[in-house]
């Protein structure tokens, strides 16, 4: 089964973009996934095909029109029914690795890319199945860069895209924690050496070290993740482990 990505955008030339190279590019050539773009402006009426208008109630910027977006979404659904629909917006819920894995296990995804001041809210009233998601607590000039990132996250999880199956599981966020630090040759660089435990050959000690570092780094760098993981954000991960 080919994973099909359908992108609703005002800038279809942005796709597949960087996804044409590296792992995603090779998977595209091997038809493990496909990319289709839908030009939102094609669904606008009138001589000038306007896709936006001024905000109701006043204010700066322009808002993408509900009638144009609704027609574009309806068209995408007809072409790709029973497929998750994401709308990229800073007002959305931050997407998680868990949700990425769910999407990657399905037939594909439809992504609606915002521009200007965002979407007319009535689009979401008419289509409650649309998931409003954000990439992070940042504001981009449009939803396209975020859509590319989400697609990359999905594509790398498709069967036979990554070389080693464990590459997709032993990573940050897969178990609710940040990944442990990584090292490789040379053994010494600028007076800094690879931790001795990683050179010991003792797999049990290595696993314990990696687990402890993963917990410590999550606690110090992402206390929000550590708290959701069940740790005490007021203590270091190693202190909690010793008490346990």
Image: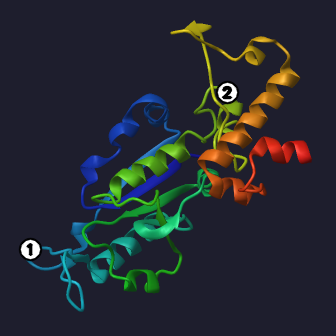
Distance of mark 1 from mark 2, alpha carbons? Answer: 51 Å
Rendered image: mark on residue 134: none
> Mark 2 highlights which residue?
164
Farthest right residue in view = 244
Residue visible at 40% across and 75% down in the picture: 74
Q: Tally the marks.
A: 2
Q: Quadrant of residue 114?
A: bottom left
- 189 over 173 or under it: above or below: above
| Neighbour tally class for label 2: few under 14, some 14-19, many 20 plus, Cα within 10 Å | few
Observer-nearest of 166 and 21: 166
Q: Quadrant of residue 143?
A: bottom left
Label 1 element class = loop
Q: Is residue 92 left or right of residue 239?
A: left
| Residue 169, horizontal then vertical, whole percent | 70, 39
Q: Nearer the viewer, mark 1 or mark 2?
A: 2
Label 2 element class = loop
Q: Is residue 151 left or right of residue 174?
A: left
First in sequence: mark 1 or mark 2? 1
Residue visible at 73% across and 42% down in the picture: 215
Observer-nearest of 9 and 207: 207
Q: Quadrant of residue 137?
A: bottom left
Q: Is residue 207 left or right of residue 63?
A: right
Q: Can residue 173 be seen in this view?
A: no
Residue visible at 54% across and 59% down in the picture: 95
| Residue 69, horizontal then vertical, whole percent | 32, 75
Q: In this view, does 225 lie to the left or right of 113?
A: right
- 55 over 48 or under it: above or below: below
Residue visible at 39% across and 31% down in the picture: 21
| Neighbour tally class for label 1: few under 14, some 14-19, many 20 plus, Cα within 10 Å | few
Q: Is residue 243 visible?
A: yes
| Residue 242, horizontal then vertical, whole percent | 88, 42
> Mark 1 highlights which residue?
48
């Amino acid at each position: 089964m080919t994973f099909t990505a359908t992108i609703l955008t005002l800038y279809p030339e942005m796709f597949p973009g960087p996804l044409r190279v590296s792992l995603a590019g090779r998977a595209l050539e091997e038809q493990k996934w496909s990319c289709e773009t839908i030009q939102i402006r094609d669904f606008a009426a009138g001589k000038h095909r306007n896709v936006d208008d001024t905000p109701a109630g006043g204010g700066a910027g322009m808002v993408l029109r509900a009638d144009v977006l609704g027609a574009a979404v309806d068209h995408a659904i007809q072409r790709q029914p029973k497929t998750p629909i994401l709308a990229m917006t800073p007002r959305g819920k931050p997407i998680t690795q868990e949700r990425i894995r769910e999407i990657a296990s399905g037939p594909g995804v439809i992504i609606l890319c915002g521009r200007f001041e965002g979407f007319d809210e009535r689009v979401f009233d008419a289509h409650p199945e649309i998931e409003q998601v954000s990439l992070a607590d940042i504001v981009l000039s449009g939803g396209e860069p975020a859509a590319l990132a989400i697609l990359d996250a999905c594509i790398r999880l498709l069967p036979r895209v990554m070389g080693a199956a464990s590459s997709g599981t032993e990573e940050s966020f897969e178990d609710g924690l940040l990944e442990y630090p990584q090292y490789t040759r040379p053994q010494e660089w600028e007076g800094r050496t690879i931790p001795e435990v990683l050179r010991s050959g003792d797999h049990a000690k290595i696993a314990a070290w990696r687990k402890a570092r993963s917990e410590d780094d999550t606690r110090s760098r992402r206390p929000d993740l550590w708290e959701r993981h069940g740790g005490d954000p007021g203590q270091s991960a190693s202190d909690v482990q010793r008490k346990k």
